[in-house]
Image (cartoon, coloured by chain):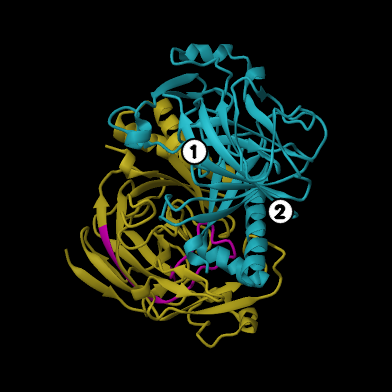
Chain colours: A cyan, B yellow
C-alpha cells in the first residue's frame, strides 16, 4: 500500500505497449500524478481565439505514465479508484472548427475560466450570472491496447483512453480490462467539469493533480470498461454503469445494454430476459461523448439503490 | 380555471386532425383523464407470456382525447403541466420479439408487477431483492400533427406523441408546438417507471388516472417539444431539456443541441458560440427512447441551478 508520485516530465503522446514504464507499483498502491495541460501548455491564461489556429496537434494529449502494475496480465480487471483531484486555478474551453458535434460553427472561439475558489464554492462563473458546477475528472484513463503499434489518443476503445466520462469524479472507480502484461496505465486530459456528450469537443480543460489508487482483480475477464460512481452524485445514490464504444451511437447503445445484461444476470441471479426488462424499466442510456472521432461512448447506468 | 374529466370511453387510436374533440377547454383549465391499458385491456394481471403472440396490434395505444383548446392556433406553445398521476395497482413489462433494442431476444417474456402500495413506499418489487423506483409518467402526450391524414402512435414526431420521456413525472411541464387549430391534445401509455432508452420496448405499462393542466403561450413559435422537470428529481434541481427526434441518434443529438443553443442564446443573452460551449461543459445528452421505430428521442438537459 505504498504512495508514489509521477511528475510533469513523465508523459507520452500515443498509446503503445512499447512505451517504457515511468514507475512500477503493486495492487493496492496509489500514485499522485501531475497532469499536463492537454495541448502541452500551448494554451495559457493569456491565449486568444486566434492562437487556436497555430496549435501543433502532435502535442495534443500528453498522458502521465505509463504505470506498470506488477502481476497484471491479460484477462485481469484493473480497478482505478479516483481518490482526489485538484485542478490548476484556470482552464479553457474552445470551439475548434472541424471538431465538435455541429459543423456550422466555423470560427475559432476561446473562453478562459477562473477556477480559483471553485473547489470551495462548488462552481465556476461563466457570464450573465451563469455558473457551472465544479466536478473535476480526467477525460483520459487507459491501459495499453491489445493490438501492437502506436495509436492516437483521440478515439476511446476497449482499453479505455479518451472516454470523457464526466461521472468519473472523486470517489468513483473505473474498471478497465487489462490487455498487456503490467497493464501500462496512463492518465491525462483533466476537466474541471463537462456535460454528457462534450458536444463542442472541449470541456473546461485544465492542468492539475490527480491521486489514483490501483487494485487488481485477477482473472475478472471483463471485456469493456465499466464504472461506479459515488453517492454524492445525482440522486444521491451510487450508480453502476456499463459502456459501449463504437463509431455508431446505436451500436454503442446495444453494446452498453448487452454488457449490463451480462453483469446483472451474473451478479443478481437473473435470467437474461429479466435483466433486459430491468434495464428497460430502471437503467438510463447516456451519451458520454460524441466528439472523439471516430468512436462514441454510450453508458447505461443503474442506481445501486435498486440492488440488494 | 375549470376542472373537467375525460373517461375511459373517450379514446382514439391514430393521430389525426380529423378526430372529433371529446371536450373543449380554455387555457388555464385542467382535466383528469382516465387512461386505458396500452393494449386496450388485452393484457391483464392474469396474462401469460404465450398471450403476447395473440395480441391485436390494431388496439395498441388507445389515447384519451382529443382535447380542443380554445384559441390555440399554429405557432402557439401548448404547455402541459403534469399535476397528478395515479396508476392502477398492477402493471406489466414484456419482451416482444421483433421490437426492442436487441434482436437476439427471440422469445416472448411477460412480467406482471404489483403496484399496490408503490406510491407510499416509493418503489416496486422485482425479484431477488431488487426494487425499482416508482416514478409514473405518461409515455404519450401529443397534439394533432401538421400533416393531413392518419398516423400511427408508435413513432414520436415534432407534435410530440410517443416521446417516452421518463422525466415527465408529477410537477413537470411539457411544451408542445401547436400545429392545428384547437391543438387537439391526447394522452396515453401510462408507465409506472422507465429508464432512459426503454430498451426492451416496454416500461411498467399500466392503466391509471392523470390530471393535466393546460396553458397556452400565444405565438411562442417553438418548433420542437421541450420540457422542464421539478426539483424533486436527480440533483434536486429543476432541469430544462430540449429534444431532437430523428431516425438516427446522431441527427437527433444535433437537433437537441441546436434547440438548446437557440434557447440559451435567446433567454440568457449569449452568443451562439457561448451557448454551444455552455452545452459542452454543463448539459447532458440522454437517449430517452431508442425503440419507437423509426424515430428516436434524444434530450439535452441543463440544470436550472446553473442559470440566473
Circle nearer the N terminus (1, 2) = 1
Left or right of A221? Residue A164 is left
In terms of secondary structure, what is the magenta stretch mainly? Answer: loop
| Label 2 residue SS | loop
Image position of A212 with respect to B5: above or below: above
> In this view of the protein, which residue sits in the foreground, A235 or B166?
A235
Q: Which residues are magenta?
A: B190-214
Residue matched to label 2: A222
Q: In the image as oriented, which residue stretches furthest toward the front?
A: A2
Is A88 drawn above or below residue B296 in the view shown? above
Q: Are marks 1 and 2 on the same chain?
A: yes
The stretch drawn in magenta includes residue B192: yes
Quick check: A181 left or right of B193?
right
- Specify whether residue A199 is painted magenta: no
Residue occupied by mark 1: A84
Residue B268 position, x and y percent, is: 30, 33
Q: Position of residue B137 (x, y in %)?
A: 40, 65
Residue in view at x 28 percent, y 54 percent: B72
User: Badge 1: few (under 14), some or many (20 or more) residues near its Cα, within 10 Å?
Assistant: some
Amino acid at each position: 500500500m505504498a504512495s508514489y508520485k509521477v511528475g510533469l516530465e513523465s508523459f507520452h503522446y500515443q498509446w503503445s505497449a512499447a512505451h517504457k514504464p515511468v514507475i512500477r507499483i503493486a495492487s493496492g498502491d496509489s500514485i499522485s500524478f501531475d497532469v499536463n495541460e492537454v495541448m502541452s501548455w500551448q494554451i495559457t491564461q493569456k491565449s486568444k481565439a486566434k492562437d487556436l489556429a497555430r496549435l501543433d496537434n502532435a502535442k495534443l494529449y500528453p498522458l502521465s505514465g505509463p504505470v506498470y502494475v506488477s502481476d497484471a496480465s491479460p484477462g485481469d480487471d484493473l480497478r482505478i479508484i479516483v481518490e482526489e483531484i485538484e485542478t490548476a486555478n484556470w482552464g479553457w474551453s474552445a470551439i475548434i472548427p472541424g471538431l465538435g458535434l455541429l459543423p456550422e460553427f466555423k470560427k475559432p472561439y476561446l473562453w478562459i475560466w477562473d477556477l480559483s475558489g471553485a473547489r470551495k464554492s462548488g462552481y465556476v462563473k461563466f457570464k450573465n450570472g451563469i455558473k457551472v458546477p465544479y466536478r473535476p475528472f480526467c477525460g483520459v484513463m487507459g491501459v495499453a491496447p491489445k493490438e501492437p503499434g502506436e495509436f492516437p489518443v483521440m478515439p476511446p476503445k476497449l482499453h479505455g483512453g479518451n472516454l470523457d466520462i464526466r461521472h468519473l469524479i472523486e470517489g468513483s472507480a473505473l474498471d478497465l480490462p487489462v490487455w498487456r502484461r503490467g497493464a501500462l496505465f496512463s492518465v491525462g486530459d483533466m476537466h474541471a467539469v463537462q456535460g454528457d456528450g462534450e458536444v463542442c469537443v472541449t470541456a473546461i480543460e485544465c492542468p492539475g493533480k490527480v491521486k489514483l489508487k490501483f487494485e487488481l482483480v485477477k482473472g475478472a475477464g471483463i471485456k469493456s470498461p465499466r464504472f461506479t460512481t459515488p453517492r454524492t452524485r445525482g440522486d444521491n445514490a451510487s450508480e453502476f454503469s456499463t459502456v459501449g464504444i463504437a463509431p455508431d451511437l446505436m451500436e454503442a447503445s446495444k453494446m452498453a445494454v448487452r454488457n449490463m445484461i451480462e453483469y446483472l444476470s451474473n451478479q443478481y441471479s437473473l435470467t437474461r430476459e429479466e435483466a433486459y426488462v430491468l434495464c428497460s424499466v430502471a437503467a438510463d442510456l447516456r451519451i458520454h461523448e460524441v466528439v472523439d472521432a471516430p468512436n462514441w461512448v454510450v453508458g447505461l447506468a443503474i442506481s445501486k439503490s435498486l440492488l440488494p
